[in-house]
Image (cartoon, grey):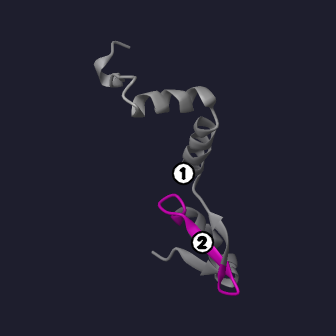
Amino acid sequence: MKSTYSVTEAQAALPAIIRNSEESIQAVEHHGKVCAYIVGRARMDAIAETLELLGNRDFASTVSKYCRGKLKMTPLAATDV
């Protein structure tokens, strides 16, 4: 499965490229340089959620404490939900 297309190829194959974007990021090149990416919705949702978490000070503090060994976490599977 191809993952990099010229602008002309992308115009002709857009529906297939969108389908392929659910499996992997698709790149579009203009004059031999990548100028755009087509990303599937699930991956984009994950990227947006990650960016939100990275921008959250409470989350960053919690991760920092965990990395320094000052915080222990319990797997969700071990909890009664």
Q: 53 left or right of 35? A: left
Q: Looking at this rendering, what residue extends furthest in the left direction?
A: 78
The circle drawn on residue 27 is 2
Residue in view at x 35 percent, y 23 percent:
72
Residue at the spot of label 1: 43
Q: Which amino acid does label 2 sit on?
A: Ala
Q: In this view, does 59 lie to the left or right of 74?
A: right
**Crowding near the residue tagged with mark 1, few <14, some 14–19, many ≥20 C-alpha atoms within 10 Å:** some
Q: Quadrant of the N terminus?
A: bottom left
Instruction: Give 46 or 51, whichever is nearer the viewer.
Output: 51
Q: Position of residue 56 (x, y in %)?
A: 63, 32
* Mark carried by residue 16: none
| Cα gap from disc 2 to disc 1, whole angstroms | 15 Å
Q: Give the range drawn in magenta.
A: 20-33
The C terminus lies in quadrant = top left
Q: What element carries label 1?
A: helix
Image position of 71 with respect to 64: above or below: above
Residue 76 location in percent, x, y?
35, 23
